[in-house]
């Protein structure tokens, strides 16, 4: 069996796919087959000489992959665990007569091709935000007013939300459509009406007929922030039973209609109703997190399904698995201190470079554990200062939460660096759309190790869940 890795680590495609590749190889070997890996990243476990039966340290291009296929003559190729890099090779591999193990090219294209995806959801009676595709800027200018501003602009076939943005008017549209066309040349640009709401996602396992949802992850920040940069809570606490039921039914319907074999990731926005915003026909970056907190080894189980076993064979249920008796929070880790001049406002384009996990019987304590090692946030002391930029200062909900917790709010509008002793500052919040890592507030926070939030909604949702004043706990 030939397994495609994800290539060099970059924002949006990192060690999570190394994790899935390694677990896939282990499952193949446990099933009695030889496993071959193609990957070209020395900073991964999957390229360690002891992991696979044979390793080809080659670029993940169709030419190099076909050289290996022609030489090794594998039973088939698994593309499901190599992120978007591997998925993007599927069509060319099939054209050359290569057998794809797992979800078929037809199923992949039903989720990746915009028009097929719309038909899939329409036929199943599943809601999605109003949208259309544009092949150039002129078409985008026509589509956006019809869809209705604000709109989400997304290039096709990219990972990590590259070149994605929420735009409010035609001036912004021109900027971001040009970026999207550059990020994915000769591919359609997706333009959807932006729906504000609660974002959540699921990873599913399927044998082509039955579907298992190990759990639902609820994002603490609302829609408009990339899922890789959002804090995620499992199991959810804000979704109603009815909403969770609809999410499960929708996930099962999609899995069955595309004949998912192995696993896929489905993302939702819950607003006036439940909308599907994206389906990834592959393992996602949430697999290591969900594997740890649910007890299901998702990549290994998905591989066994790809090799022909069923959920029944594996002793697995269908539908939504019984939630764990603990709460888990996944929090992002950012490398802003190492990336001078980087635009750092949280948005649809991913910026985080890692993540931490907090687990506890209390969601508030699980959150505190995750935050201690991601944002570096610890229990506040009454009277500590929270510095807000003028945009964040307009967030009346956040200001009220901070004041109720006994914290002092100060607005910093100067272009000079703050001169406060950093020990007196609990956190810095900058909500300016154009901010970079060298903005005065951000530079002050990053230079002094003060927790920095580049979206006001992040700290507001932390305050809501932790009920600060009750605990952000000492660890």
Image (cartoon, rainbow, N blue to C red):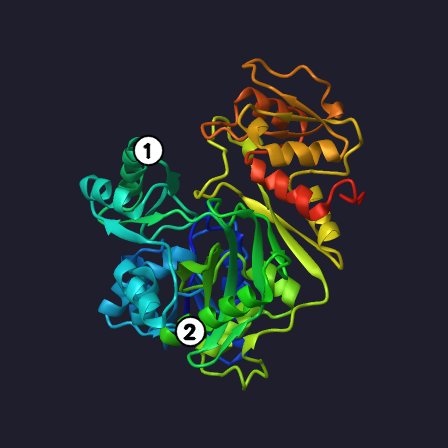
Q: Is residue 298 visible?
A: yes
Residue placed under numbered mark 2 in the picture: 253
Q: How many marks?
A: 2
Compared with residue 229, is residue 241 higher up or lower down, i.e. above or below?
below
Compared with residue 437, is residue 72 higher up or lower down, i.e. above or below?
below
* Image-based side of 355 in relation to 377, left or right: left
Residue for point 58% across, 32% down? 395
Residue for point 50% across, 66% down? 247
**Quadrant holding the C terminus:** top right
Compared with residue 80, is residue 219 higher up or lower down, i.e. above or below?
above
Residue 112, position as x, y percentages in the image: 33, 60
Q: Secondary structure at mark 2?
A: helix
**Quadrant holding the N terminus:** bottom left
Nearer to me, 197 or 14: 197
Q: Which residue lies most toward the front here? A: 272
Quarter of image, res 96: bottom left
Q: Which mark is residue 172?
A: 1
Residue 356, position as x, y percentages in the image: 64, 49
Q: Secondary structure at mark 1?
A: helix
Residue for point 31% across, 55% down? 61
How many neighbours does mark 2 have within 10 angstroms: few (below 14), some (14-19), or many (20 or more)?
some
Residue 232, position as x, y percentages in the image: 59, 53
Q: Is residue 24 visible?
A: no
Please tell me which of labels 2 and 1 falls first in the chain.
1
* Image-based side of 268 in relation to 338, left or right: left
Residue 128, position as x, y percentages in the image: 38, 59
Nearer to me, 246 or 104: 246
Q: Which mark is residue 189?
A: none
* Image-based side of 10 in relation to 189, left or right: right
């Amino acid at each position: 069996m030939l397994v495609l890795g994800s290539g060099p680590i970059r924002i949006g495609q990192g060690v999570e796919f190394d994790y899935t590749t390694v677990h896939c190889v282990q499952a193949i070997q446990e099933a009695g087959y030889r496993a071959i890996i193609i990957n070209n990243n020395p900073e991964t476990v999957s390229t360690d000489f002891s992991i696979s039966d044979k390793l080809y340290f080659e670029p993940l291009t169709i030419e190099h992959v076909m050289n290996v296929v022609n030489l090794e003559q594998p039973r088939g190729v698994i593309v499901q665990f190599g992120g978007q890099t591997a998925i993007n090779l599927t069509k060319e591999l099939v054209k050359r007569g290569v057998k794809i193990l797992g979800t078929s090219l037809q199923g992949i294209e039903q989720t990746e091709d915009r028009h097929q995806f719309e038909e899939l959801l329409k036929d199943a009676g599943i809601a999605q935000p109003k949208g259309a595709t544009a092949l150039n800027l002129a078409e985008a200018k026509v589509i956006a007013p019809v869809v209705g501003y604000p709109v989400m602009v997304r290039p096709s076939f990219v990972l990590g939300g590259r070149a994605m943005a929420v735009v409010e008017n035609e001036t912004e549209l021109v900027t971001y459509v040009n970026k999207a066309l550059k990020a994915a040349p000769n591919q359609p640009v997706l333009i959807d009406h932006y729906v504000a709401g609660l974002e959540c996602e699921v990873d599913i396992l399927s044998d082509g007929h039955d579907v298992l949802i190990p759990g639902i992850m609820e994002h603490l920040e609302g829609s408009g922030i990339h899922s890789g940069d959002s804090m995620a809570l499992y199991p959810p606490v804000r979704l109603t039973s009815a909403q969770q039921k609809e999410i499960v039914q929708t996930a099962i319907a999609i899995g069955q209609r595309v004949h998912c074999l192995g696993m896929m990731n489905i993302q939702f926005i819950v607003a006036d109703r439940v909308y599907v915003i994206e389906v990834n026909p592959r393992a996602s970056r949430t697999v290591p997190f969900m594997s740890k907190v649910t007890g299901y080894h998702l990549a290994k189980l998905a591989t066994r399904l790809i090799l022909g076993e069923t959920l029944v064979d594996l002793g697995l249920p269908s539908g939504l698995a019984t939630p764990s008796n603990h709460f888990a929070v996944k929090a992002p880790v950012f490398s802003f201190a190492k990336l001078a001049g980087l635009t750092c406002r949280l948005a649809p384009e991913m910026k985080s470079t890692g993540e931490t996990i907090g687990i506890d019987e209390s969601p508030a304590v699980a959150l505190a554990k995750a935050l201690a090692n991601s944002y570096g946030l610890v229990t506040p002391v009454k009277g500590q200062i929270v510095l807000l930029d003028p945009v964040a200062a307009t967030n009346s909900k956040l200001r009220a939460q901070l004041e109720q917790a006994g914290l002092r709010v100060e607005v910093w509008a100067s272009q000079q660096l703050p001169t406060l002793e950093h020990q007196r500052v609990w956190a810095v919040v900058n909500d300016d759309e154009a901010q970079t890592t060298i903005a005065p507030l951000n530079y002050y926070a990053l230079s002094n190790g003060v927790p920095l939030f580049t979206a006001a909604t992040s700290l507001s949702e932390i305050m809501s869940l932790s009920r600060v004043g009750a605990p952000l706990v000492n660890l």
